[in-house]
Image: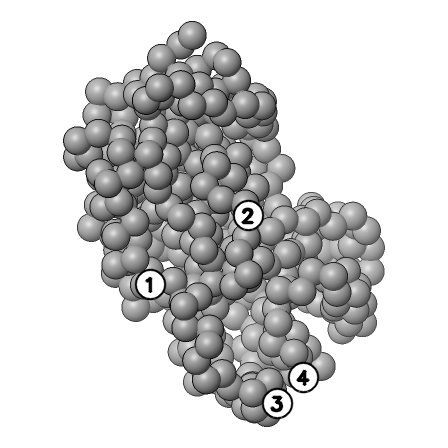
Amino acid sequence: MDYYDLIIIGAGPAGSTLARALQDSGKRILIIDKQAFPRDKTCAGWVTPAVMDELKIDLDDYNTGRTLQPIRRFRIGMMGQDAVENDHGAIVSFGIRRCEFDAYLLDRVSSPKALGTPVKSIVRKGANWVINETWEAPLIVGAGGHFCPVARLLGDGPGRHETVVAAKEAEFEMTAEQASVCEARGDTPELWFCRDLKGYAWVFRKGNYLNVGLGREDNHKLTDHLEAFVKEMKAYGRIPDTVPGRFKGHAYLLYAHAERPLVDDGILLIGDSAGLAYTQSGEGIRPAIESALMAADVIRKAEDCSASSLQVYGDAIAARFGNRAAEDEDGWQVPEWMKLALASPLMRSHWFTRKVVTEKWFLHQGVPLLASAV
């Protein structure tokens, strides 16, 4: 049996950030992930300058041999309407490929790694946890996304108020012919909101790579909405006629409606396993990074691995992202017809699509950097 002070399950951005933040702590850390890296990860794939700053990524270094698409504009619209294009006048985000980004972050970590290793068992043994009858630690951190096996230890899955967003997308490298007819521009991601406001789709070009996808709250209609969107984008020339037919799916929880506990005795959840995706946009990379940095601070200072000692992390998450909103569900709600009536003209407004949709909901420009950024 190999003993560690901390075992992190999930080697994505949250898990790798936590391990790197604790590299000089003297703690023995193991990272486990069911996949080998680089891995194929479904994600639209853009990160804000704030994420790059919090991770202290040298942009010139990252851009060497990897995709780093500067973003200066956004095209935003409601399906069936003309889009509004806004020029932000500066780089407000970067397009990345998750297979490259995740591997880059993990390569910066010196801790031992068990990659390509599914977690088959997690068993409590006294004050410790035993993983796969091989590794033992008093603290395990769930960083394995929505279906993280550590998260399953803290409950029976999503509660009745939790909003699980299901998404499907495809990312592929365009041929020269496809690139020549694709009207989507690399510095201008396109966001298209469903008319019932239950989700949105996107077209995102990153050099010769194109990412097309759609996410919704009601996943039983997801495929129909995606097919209709792809057909419309092809008709308008936004994407080539020959988009690969295979779209990959994934799911995540929206922060304001998630009910998952964040800590228990010897357990802590970060990133998507904790349900931290921004409620308005579903973007999860910045919350994943910041939750990992906050968890590192708590782990450094905690007297032990009890739930009472780790609860400081839960308090820090609430202070940073706000309190969960599930308890407010019984309050007065805006009728659906009113939402639709208001949304249609708003999505034609340059001010609303720029100041609210892009800068507030998707870029979170008013949110200062986390003080504990590595």
Residue at the image position 27 percent from the left and 34 percent from the top: 306
Residue sitting at the far top: 1
Q: Which mark is residue 323?
A: 1
Picture quadrant where residue 299 is located: top left
Badge 1 marks a residue whose secondary structure is loop
Q: How many marks?
A: 4
Answer whether residue 181 is visible to the viewer in this image: no
User: Label 3 sits on what residue type?
Assistant: Trp
Q: Are marks 4 and 1 in contact (CB under 8 Å)?
A: no
Q: Which mark, residue 157?
A: 2
* x then y, percent, for residue 276: 43, 54
| Distance CA(mark 3)–CA(mark 4) | 18 Å
Camera-nearest label, 3 or 4: 3
- Please tell me whether mark 4 sits on a helix, a strand or a loop: loop
In this picture, is 229 found above or below 247? below
Mark 4 → mark 1, Cα distance in angstroms = 35 Å
Q: Are marks 3 and 4 in contact (CB under 8 Å)?
A: no
**Amino acid at the residue labelled 4:** Gln
Q: Which residue is mark 3?
A: 337
- Sequence order check: which comes first, mark 3 or mark 1? 1
> Sequence order check: which comes first, mark 2 or mark 3?
2
Residue annotated with mark 4: 81
Q: Is 243 or 334 nearer to us in this picture?
A: 334
